[in-house]
Amino acid sequence: MNLVRSLPLLALAAITVVTSAQTVMSRATPPESTAELIKVSGELAQLKKLSPNVTAADRWQVLWLHQRISEQVTAASLQVDATVAQIDNEIARANEVRGYLSDRRDRAVSRTNLLGILLGGAVGATASGLQLSSNLTKPAAGVGIGAGALSAGIALTGIREEKGRNSTFEFQSNMLAEFFDRPMLPNSRYPETIWIFLNESSPSGPPGITRKEDLLQNWVQVRRIDSLSSKEKIDHLTSEPAEDLKLSIDDFEDRSAMLQDVRARISYLKRDLGELLTSLPPVEIQP
């Protein structure tokens, strides 16, 4: 009863923590830091210097600076879109394989449970029928013991089938590999801008911890991986088709969840790019 009563409190605490985390993560990176990331910090400083009093002589320079910054923002934004698209495709394929394996597992477990009920009931009824005769007491007991052993064996089979079957992942993508310094497929390398972004500290995150390190710590904390030295698990999360590794349902689920975490973290870069564009001083050219 104490556990049941404590569940609402635990749920409320979890909601509070999640809400606080979302509030913290909603803070944008300063525009100056974003400008440095996409290599337009010099252009931004020059634009701010010229903007208060733009003359006709500076008109083309100001327009060029705006154009240059906008082009770099667009390029970085497209890199984010391309990276997210690759991640989304890997997530979709991992979920597809996981769903297939889960369906097969569920059907196998259902058939095993049904078989256990039918056989247990039939043998149990036979044992009960034998007990109606006083001369068949011992055979009835033997049949009853056999029924119990049979039911236990079928139950153990159902428990083993709960894990489901394993399967290779035949999709040419391993977007988690670079996080664990594992070999990467050519289409699974993060663009330089995004990789630098992940290896920088977030202004609203833990001090001294990069976004990449924060993700790794979170994965260990929620038991996606036991530790950063869990070689076999990390091999499964970063596998490529040529390795022919057999992944379990849990491996596919963890891979998909971790990729979603990466996707969400990368998406913050687009918010920062928008903040940079918003912070640009307006162009007011006097005739």
Image: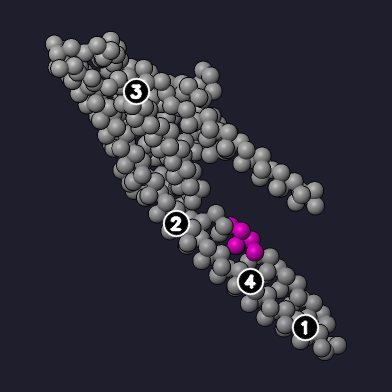
User: Is 49 left or right of 87, judged from the image as shown?
Assistant: left
Spatial separation of the CA atoms under disc 2 and disc 3 = 45 Å
Pair 2/1: label in front: 2
Local secondary structure at mark 3: helix
Viewer-nearest residue: 265 or 259: 265
Q: In the image, what residue type sits under mark 2?
A: Gly
Q: Give the residue number, with chain letter if any, for mark 4.
A: 116
How would you classify the magenta stretch by its main secondary structure? helix
Sort mark 1 into few (<14), some (14-19) or many (20+) by Cα contacts within 10 Å.
Answer: some
Q: Which mark is residue 128?
A: 1
Q: Which residues are magenta?
A: 155-160
Residue 109 in the image: state x and y as whole percent: 56, 64
Q: Give the residue number, with chain letter if any, for mark 2.
A: 99
- Is residue 120 shown in magenta? no
Q: In the image, what residue type sits under mark 3?
A: Ser
The C terminus appears in which quarter of the rendering? top left
Q: Give the residue number, with chain letter if any, for mark 3.
A: 279
Point out the tag, 1 or 4, that comes first from the N-terminus: 4
Point out the tag, 3 or 4, that comes first from the N-terminus: 4
Find residue 155 and report its image quarter: bottom right
Q: Residue at x 24, y 26 (%)?
A: 70
Q: In the image, what residue type sits under mark 1?
A: Ser
Do tag 2 and tag 3 residues touch (Cβ < 8 Å)?
Answer: no
Would you place residue 81 above or below residue 206 in this image? Answer: below
Point out the tag, 2 or 4, that comes first from the N-terminus: 2
